[in-house]
Image (cartoon, grey):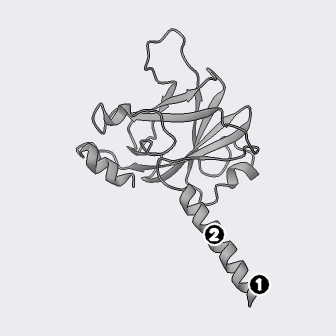
Amino acid sequence: MMLTLALLLAVSSNAVQAQEAMKLGKLNFMNLKEGEKPIMDGLTLSGNRCGSEAFNAKPYATEGIRSVFELDEWVNFYPNTNAETGIKVMIFQHKDDQQFYLKNTLNDETSGYCQTCELNKDPEAEEPCPWDSFYLHPDEWSPGFYDFVFIYKNKVFATLLTRFYKPDELHEKSDSELEKLMK
């Protein structure tokens, strides 16, 4: 009985940790050695169809990052990092098991793969300038949850859960309504 109770508590604890890590708009840092800091310590995402200018210009964060977009909306990346090149973001249809990204080779043949962005700072551009951007075409992808997988030097260091809606489903919503969708 004690072993069963201990096993249930361990499973329950792992489920709570997994659920905590899967919040919309929260960078889920992974694959870091003890005491190691991630190459990127904050992120801002913006879009071109939904939300006010203030909503799309939030400060760098690890939580509360804009995480809801429409399928045909351009998503712009603004990482807070000292690396000016070399960060790659792979976009996948959401996987409940985030360890999948650590256990498998990630490429355009990987199950659920959508796109890749190469985050490179343009030294000639005036700030703020997105490091890269993309959109999901509504004829190719469905509304739903997507993972942004952040990679540096071929090593996954973070994931971010996002949600994409049908075209025109969000663009008339207020900032506060968009914030509620991100909770």
Q: Position of residue 5 (x, y in %)?
A: 69, 84
Q: Where is residue 132 in the image (x, y as percent from the top left)?
A: 51, 26
How many C-alpha atoms fall within 10 Å of the one at disc 2: few (<14), some, or many (≥20)? Answer: few
For this orientation, the residue located farthest to the bottom is 1
Q: Where is residue 4 in the image (x, y as percent from the top left)?
A: 73, 85
Q: Is residue 103 above or below residue 132?
A: below
Quadrant containing the C terminus is bottom left
Left or right, 29 with reference to 67:
right
User: In front here: 105 or 162?
Assistant: 162
Give the residue number, with chain letter if any, for mark 1.
3
Which mark sits nearer the N-terminus, 2 or 1?
1
Residue at 63% x, 69% y is 13
Q: Position of residue 39 (x, y in %)?
A: 65, 32
Q: Is residue 117 above or below residue 99?
A: above
User: In front here: 114 or 179?
Assistant: 179
User: In front here: 45 or 69?
Assistant: 45
Give the residue number, with chain letter if any, for mark 2.
13
Amino acid found under the numbered disc labelled 2: Ser
Q: Is residue 12 above or below residue 49?
A: below
- Which secondary structure lies at badge 1? helix
Residue at 42% x, 32% y is 59
| Quarter of the rendering containing residue 126 | top left
Amino acid found under the numbered disc labelled 1: Leu
- Give how far apart the Cα atoms at labels 2 and 1 are: 15 Å
Residue at 46% x, 34% y is 44
